[in-house]
Amino acid sequence: MNSPSRISERLDLVTSAQVRAGIALLHACGTASAALYLCSLGVGLNVALRVLTRPRLRRT
């Protein structure tokens, strides 16, 4: 059985991969497309725009 920390870790890895894909989309297609992609995954618009437009504020 998976422990809660292992599940959280897995979800964090998935979220991290999704954010990286959004950033790649930003470079390829622009902010609007990247924001739409992240929002389609359930990321709030304000969070998506912060991640995409303020690289210094991204989590590491």
Image (spheres, grey):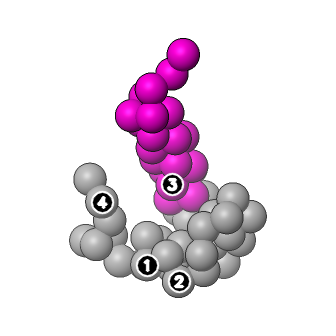
Real-space CA distance between mark 4 and mark 2, rounded to the nearest whole angstrom: 15 Å
User: Of marks 1 and 3, which one's residue comes earlier in the chain?
Assistant: 3
Disc 1: which residue: 50
User: Of marks 4 and 3, which one's residue comes earlier in the chain?
Assistant: 3
Badge 3 amino acid = Val
User: Of marks 2 and 3, which one's residue comes earlier in the chain?
Assistant: 3
Residue at 43%, 70% in the rendered image: 51
Disc 4: which residue: 59
Residue 45 sits in quarter: bottom right
Residue 59 horizontal/vertical position (percent): 30, 60
Q: Tell me, yes or no, whether the highlighted magenta stretch contains residue 4.
A: yes
On screen, residue 1 above or below 52? above
Residue projecting furthest to the right = 40
On screen, residue 9 above or below 20? above
- Report the predominant secondary structure element of the magenta stretch: helix
Neighbour tally class for label 2: few under 14, some 14-19, many 20 plus, Cα within 10 Å = few
Q: Give the range drawn in magenta.
A: 1-23
Real-space CA distance between mark 2 and mark 3, rounded to the nearest whole angstrom: 14 Å
Q: Which mark is residue 46?
A: 2
Q: Residue 1 carries which label?
A: none
